[in-house]
Image (spheres, helix red, strand yellow):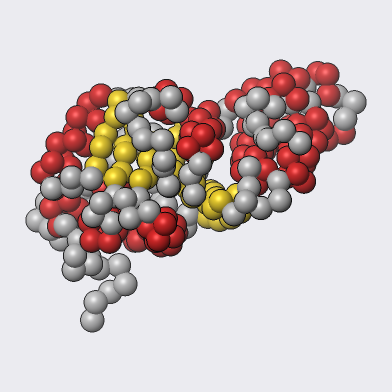
């Protein structure tokens, strides 16, 4: 009997070895089986988004921000693009040139002609001529601190149909909370972030709440869940946004009200919303 997390018949064994999901001799040990489980778990969330985009554009375009070794991009291409979207393109955005070069070599070796790798910051990618105007799906897994917000800004600028985020290292809001703590002492809510460890944790939670409200204010339907089994990181909150042209005014008002309540009005540019 085939186990739930055994290798699928159409998957590239050589690619799985290169990504260290399989051992060098192509076997599944306890560690590699866990990695494969993680891959399928994440793909479970992303596959319906790809199918929805493919129904509109046969040449589906996905951008993966903070790609690193392009682990996600390679898996998506192998499991979906290779057979279902042969005209599609995946762009991996990464600032470390050695990782960009390595990914290009691996894509060439695997015969993945629809993969592109660009040495760019997330912020710079917004205006880069190396990327097409239309982008259907944007992903950003563990893009640190404000890089996740830059990925949101990129997705909004490109009118992406779907956005998949696993935020990481949200320090900017926590720093702003510390900066304004003195002027907010009259507000009893300040107790939530008075102690440094609470400032860090509340800042992280607040950042993701603001991101969700921002996406809703721009017409997206937002789902927040847990990336179960992603043992290599404690940051496993998964935010999925799908554009539905939903009512936006209330979310924008709530976002601005939250910023005012915690004394972060000067962050309205970071969490920008359409004009009310």
Residue 225 in which image quadrant: bottom right
Q: On the picture, is 239 further left or further right than 1?
A: right
Task: Residue 161: tell me if it is visible.
Answer: yes
- Residue at position x 30%, y 67% in the image: 5
Closer to the camera, 152 or 27?
Answer: 152
- Residue at position x 30%, y 44% in the image: 90
Residue 33 image offset from top left, x and y in percent = 28, 61
Closer to the camera, 223 or 142?
Answer: 223
Task: Residue 71: tell me if it is visible.
Answer: no
- Residue at position x 29%, y 45% in the image: 89
Say which quadrant the C terminus sits in.
Answer: top right
Residue 61 image offset from top left, x and y in percent = 35, 46
Residue 165 image offset from top left, x and y in percent = 49, 44
Q: On the picture, is 190 further left or further right than 98?
A: right
Closer to the camera, 78 or 237?
Answer: 78
Residue farthest to the bottom?
1
């Amino acid at each position: 009997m085939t186990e739930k997390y055994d290798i699928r018949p159409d998957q590239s064994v050589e690619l799985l070895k290169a990504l260290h999901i399989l051992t060098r001799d192509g076997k599944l040990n306890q560690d590699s089986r866990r990695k494969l489980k993680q891959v399928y778990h994440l793909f479970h969330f992303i596959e319906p988004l790809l199918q929805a985009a493919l129904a509109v554009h046969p040449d589906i375009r996905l951008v993966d921000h903070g790609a690193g070794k392009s682990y996600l991009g390679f898996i998506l291409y192998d499991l979906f693009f290779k057979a279902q979207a042969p005209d599609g393109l995946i762009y991996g955005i990464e600032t470390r040139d050695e990782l960009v070069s390595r990914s290009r070599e691996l894509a060439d070796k695997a015969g993945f002609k629809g993969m592109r790798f660009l040495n760019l910051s997330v912020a710079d990618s917004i205006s880069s001529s190396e990327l097409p105007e239309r982008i259907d799906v944007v992903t950003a897994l563990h893009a640190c601190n404000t890089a996740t917000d830059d990925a949101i800004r990129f997705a909004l600028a490109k009118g992406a149909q779907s956005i998949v985020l696993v935020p990481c290292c949200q320090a900017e809001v926590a720093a702003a909370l510390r900066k304004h703590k003195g002027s907010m002492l009259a507000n009893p809510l300040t107790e939530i972030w008075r102690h440094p460890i609470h400032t860090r944790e509340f800042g992280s939670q607040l950042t993701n709440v603001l991101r969700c409200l921002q996406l809703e204010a721009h017409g997206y339907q937002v789902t927040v869940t847990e990336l179960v089994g992603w043992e290599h990181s404690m940051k496993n909150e998964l935010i999925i946004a799908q554009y539905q042209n939903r009512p936006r005014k209330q979310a924008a008002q709530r976002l601005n009200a939250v910023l005012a309540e915690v004394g972060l009005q000067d962050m309205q540019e970071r969490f920008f919303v359409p004009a009310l």
